[in-house]
Image: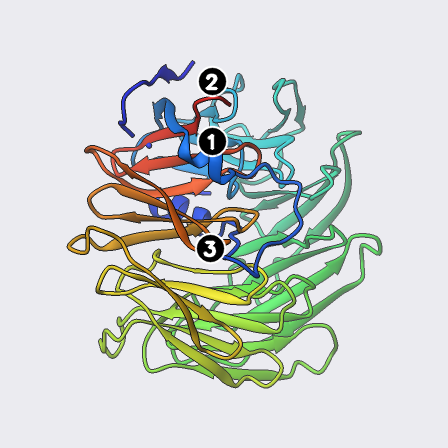
Amino acid sequence: MLNSFNTHKLTTTFQTIYTAILLLAISVLLHGCNQSSQKASLSPDQTRALIPIATTNIGQSYSRTSLPGGQYNITLASEQVTLTDTQNQNVKILPVPNTTFVAISPSEKLIATSHSNKTISIYTLPELNFITLPPTTNVITDLVISPDDTLLIVYEDSKTVSLWDIKSASLTAIYDLSAWPSVSQRIDSIQISTQGDLWASISYNPTPAIRVCDLKQLQDCKSFTGKPTARQVTDIILNTTWTQALIVSGASAQLLNIDDSSGITKLLTSEDNLEQWQYSPNGKLISAQTSGSINKLYTTTINVWDTNTGEETHVFMRSIYMNSTDICPQWRSVATSSDTGSILIWDINNGNQVESLSVKDTNSDIIYIRYSPDGKLLAALNATGTLYFWDTSDYSLIREINIPAPHPYMFEFSDSTPSITTLTNKGELTIWRAASS
């Protein structure tokens, strides 16, 4: 069990990856960005009654896996998997030892683990009943579970991909990718589409390449290649419908059409290094943040492009903290923190500032901003541990919580319960809920 907690004290791959994964959490912005949702989000009244109810230490630098806003946090350390259930406030150790890799399904109903003997275990949640698949020939470096929990994709370091039917625990297909895109070029990631009908193998360097296969017509595969880049490719991102790929390289990115054989590309550029790329849900816009690491201009901005034309549509100023910017998931607005301690709300379509929110402690920088899943709340955290909540219907300040040291460096709204979690640099994860919930 997690430790009981009564005072205001706070909490895949490494801590930075965990943070990056949490940054990929679905957030909703302000009035006009509210979306109809069944997600259990905090109400303004519940926010006024928030208290810390439990805490656990999940470590500082171990391999972690979690879903944005999800119920479970998974830690892999010394070949042992620890499962933290933030909703029911308990911690369990997975029974199969010698784990080398762990993955959780998008539904949070299944966990897959690989082991040093090259076997794979598939667990059901929350019961932790499991089945074991036969050993593979080579070392497993990636596991991907389909959105409907029926398929497991296994990638071995020999560039072999196998597809497994989870219900029957049977092998359905094997792909030999040893010569794709070339014998010497590695494969960097395996992905499956949100609809669960396609899977892709992705390779970054020296030639960015994507191979997309149909899961119903197993031998129906198409390959697409981007143009050579001056700097190393650091990421390849597919849009929601898998009709376009974003090939990220330093201060530029290519947009590559992958819904036909044209392979048409567009080039997006900036004066400085670009990070935190993301597509809008409809795929019509793309955003990225400058980091000042190439030309070292340190003019930190969030830039937005039109994916149809490749033209930059707007540039919004922001503070130096990468995590203190958030975009409405419907992409109507963007929130940024300023160097003066205020939070600015912008219309993402016309570029106009529509609101400015002030905080009392202007001497402490805002380091983290997020929106609740239903868009009714905006929350911000400053460097001295003060957490602010606004009601986005009228932008009124609902609550201000002063959290003593060790201060959290991030927080997250839950998608499954009306709660939040906070995380400190010491690995302390704390669950907050309304006193009556």
Residue 344 on image: x %, y %: 36, 65
Residue 112 on image: x %, y %: 60, 32
Q: For the residue marked with disc 2, what is the amino acid?
A: Asn
Precedes in sequence: disc 3 or disc 1:
1
The answer to whether residue 40 is above or below residue 310 is above
Q: Which callout, 3 or 2, points to the residue nearer the camera?
A: 3
Q: For the residue marked with disc 3, what is the amino acid?
A: Asp
Disc 3 on helix, strand or loop? loop
**Of all residues shown, which one is farthest toward the right?**
217
Dot 2 surroundings within 10 Å: few (below 14), some, or many (20 or more)? some
Q: Which residue is mark 2?
A: 90
The answer to whether residue 292 is above or below residue 101 is below
Precedes in sequence: disc 2 or disc 1:
1
Q: Which residue is mark 1?
A: 74
Disc 2 on helix, strand or loop? strand
Disc number at residue 130? Answer: none
Disc number at residue 394? Answer: 3
Front residue of this view, candidates 27 and 298: 27
Residue 61 visible in the picture: no
Q: Which callout, 2 or 1, points to the residue nearer the camera?
A: 2
Q: For the residue marked with disc 1, what is the amino acid?
A: Ile
